[in-house]
Amino acid sequence: MLRFHFLPKFSLVVFCSFILFTIIGTLSHEFGHIAVAKYFGYDIALDYGSMNYFQKGYLKDPALKELNNIVAEYDYNTYGSWPTDMKSKVEALSLVLDKKYPSIPDTHALYVALGGPLQTLLTSFIGLLILFFRRKKRKDQFKLMDWLAVFMSLFALREVFNYAQASYSVICLSKSSFHADEFKISRYLGCNEWGIPTISLIIGLTISFYIIFKIIPIKYRFSFIVSGLVGGILGFAIWFGFLGEMLFN
């Protein structure tokens, strides 16, 4: 149920909070991957919207540093026109690295891929747990802790967003390959590529609808939905558009 009454001051707070929590959610998601990769002993490279992991010692290997220096000097997009001696050197260095550092096992890759979504959903369930234990106090007044728990619970919206983004790519861009964690997990498990994303979507929608239409007081719902939608989209655009790259570079 909604009351179409817009609360400007409240909406501004929610708007800014969604921008902030979109960024926090993105980084904490990556730390979920990092925690698993660290457990297996891999070296980590964190970027503003992704993380990469490598065999121990790979990032500090002299051969990799030399390879990176060459790539920095020459444009890799024009590799075909590089001098023959440089291409030979790159191939030799790549071969050294391939022999020295074996490929990452699929089981490890699966667990690392799981780390991000599990962290996101764990945060969401912790938020739900806080709301559950505060259900009696919440009847008198919705306080800061309740709002914090609401935003934690809505981390599950990431699963909805990922599915929507992939669906848009299929319908409007004719894409057929996806790199989101849920699709990777499906491939590692050998099931239909859309299997895990669909399950994640259902979980995300269930939690989100429960929070919005059951937990948030009715007088705040319309303002929360409108400002949250705009703030979430803008937060994504700001972080991936320029802020993330600016801070990490």
Image: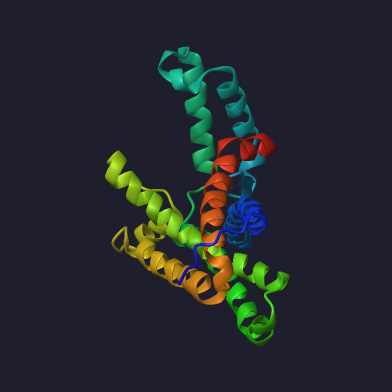
Q: Position of residue 182 (x, y in %)?
A: 42, 59
Q: Relative to residue 116, is residue 209 drawn left or right?
A: left
Question: Can the viewer see residue 168 in this picture?
Answer: yes
- The percent coordinates of residue 213 (x first, y second) are 49, 72
Instruction: Name above or below for residue 132 compared with residue 52.
Output: below
Q: Could you tell me which quadrant the N terminus lies in?
A: bottom left
Decide which of 124, 64 is in the foreground and name it.
124
Name above or below for residue 155 compared with residue 176: below
- State the quadrant of the C terminus: top right
Outermost residue, front direction? 5
Q: Residue at x 50, y 58 (%)?
A: 158
Query: Where residue 26 appears, x then y in whole percent?
Result: 58, 53
Q: Is residue 180 left or right of residue 217?
A: left
Q: How is the image coloured?
A: rainbow
Decide which of 124, 4 is in the foreground and name it: 4
Q: Residue 31 appears in which quarter of the rendering?
A: bottom right
Q: Quadrant of residue 101?
A: top right
